[in-house]
């Protein structure tokens, strides 16, 4: 009888994390690069005297380290890595502006003597530009505020934006009283003044954020005090061989250690996710393997 063909594994096809209680899948990761499961044991050596080699060796603690290179940042992966589900916002056909909030001092935002609110200028949503904005009182004598923006990444949307200095200033407006409005040209934004006489204090600041028209958007705050990374299972498939062979690993119980965000020049971001598998007493093991050969 000839030797059997060796069992081989080629590439990777998918990883599907699942809920250990219900068995339901969180989703599937398919944009994958080099990944591995490394099972190893500590070796405990007995040494003594002048003998240069151990008298005996026994196995100590074993570990199962999982490494996944994932080129996608889906909501389910963020939830499993950071213990909090991202907020998926509905489509915003005309974009959105968050509430203007005092950051330094208290005079910039005031419904009576400061800026009452900020909103999208009617009919100008195409000029909204993605980013974080700072409004600073730069001349209280004339009720003038300067507006600064975190990046020029979206300046080409609608009417082209531009910086006017190295402090990332994009423009300035004079805040009107008695509830009147004033537009920030080229950015689709409209400031509404307070209902009374404007009384600003130089140096006070306020902040807000802008989303241009979109089909969806996602928000997530990472690192909350009550966030808890869940225990999960995951099923890993190697690529299907040309022979039709398939190889599956079912990791019974594991935890992710995070989801790195890579920003390398002119390269797709690939997250090197680390996880560790540990013992599942109900299934009496840490993982199972299945191989099928048509």
Image (cartoon, grey):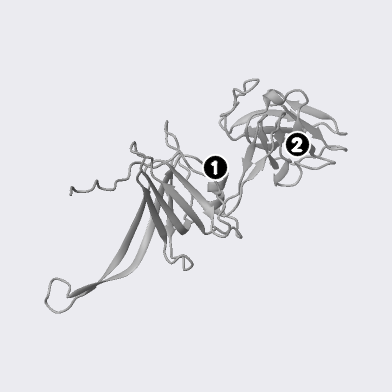
Hey, which residue is sitting farthest front in the picture?
A: 1
At 71% from the left and 29% from the top, the residue drawn is 93
- Closer to the camera, 19 or 50? 19
- Establish if 9 lies above or below 230: above
- Residue 74's disc number: 1
From the image, tell me which residue sits under label 2. Answer: 140
Foreground tag (1 vs 2):
1
Mark 2 or mark 1, which is nearer the start of the sequence? 1
- Closer to the camera, 56 or 273? 56
Hey, which residue is sitting farthest top in the picture?
A: 159
- Establish if 94 lies above or below 39: above
- Closer to the camera, 195 or 61? 61
Q: Where residue 8 sits: x, y (%)?
A: 29, 46
At 56% from the left and 29% from the top, the residue drawn is 153
**In terms of image quadrants, where is residue 20?**
bottom right
- Closer to the camera, 84 or 104? 84
Kindly state the secondary structure of the residue where label 1 is placed.
loop
């Amino acid at each position: 009888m000839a030797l059997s063909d060796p069992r081989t594994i080629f590439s990777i096809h998918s990883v599907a994390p699942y809920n250990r209680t219900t068995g339901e899948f969180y989703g599937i990761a398919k944009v994958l690069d080099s990944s591995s499961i490394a099972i190893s044991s500590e070796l405990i050596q007995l040494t003594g005297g002048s003998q240069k080699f151990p008298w005996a060796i026994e196995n100590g603690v074993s570990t199962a380290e999982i490494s996944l290179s994932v080129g996608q940042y889906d909501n389910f992966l963020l939830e499993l890595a950071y213990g909090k589900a991202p907020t998926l916002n509905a489509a915003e056909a005309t974009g959105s502006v968050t509430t203007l909030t005092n950051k330094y001092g208290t005079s910039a935002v005031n419904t009576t003597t400061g800026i009452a609110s900020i909103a999208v200028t009617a009919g100008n949503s195409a000029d909204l530009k993605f980013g974080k904005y700072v409004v600073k009182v730069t001349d209280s004598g004339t009720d003038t505020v300067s507006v600064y923006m975190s990046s020029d990444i979206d300046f080409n949307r609608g009417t082209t934006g531009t910086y006017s200095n190295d402090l990332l200033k994009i423009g300035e407006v004079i805040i009107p009283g008695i509830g009147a409005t004033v537009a920030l040209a080229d950015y689709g934004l409209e400031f509404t003044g307070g209902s009374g006489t404007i009384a600003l204090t130089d140096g006070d600041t306020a902040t807000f954020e802008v989303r241009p028209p979109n089909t969806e958007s996602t928000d997530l705050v990472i690192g909350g005090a009550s966030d808890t990374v869940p225990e999960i299972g995951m099923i890993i498939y190697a690529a299907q061989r040309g022979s039709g062979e398939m190889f599956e690993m079912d990791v019974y119980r594991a935890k992710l250690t995070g989801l790195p965000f890579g920003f390398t020049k002119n390269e797709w971001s690939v997250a090197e996710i680390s996880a560790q598998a540990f013992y599942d007493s109900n299934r009496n093991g840490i993982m199972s393997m299945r191989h099928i050969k048509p």
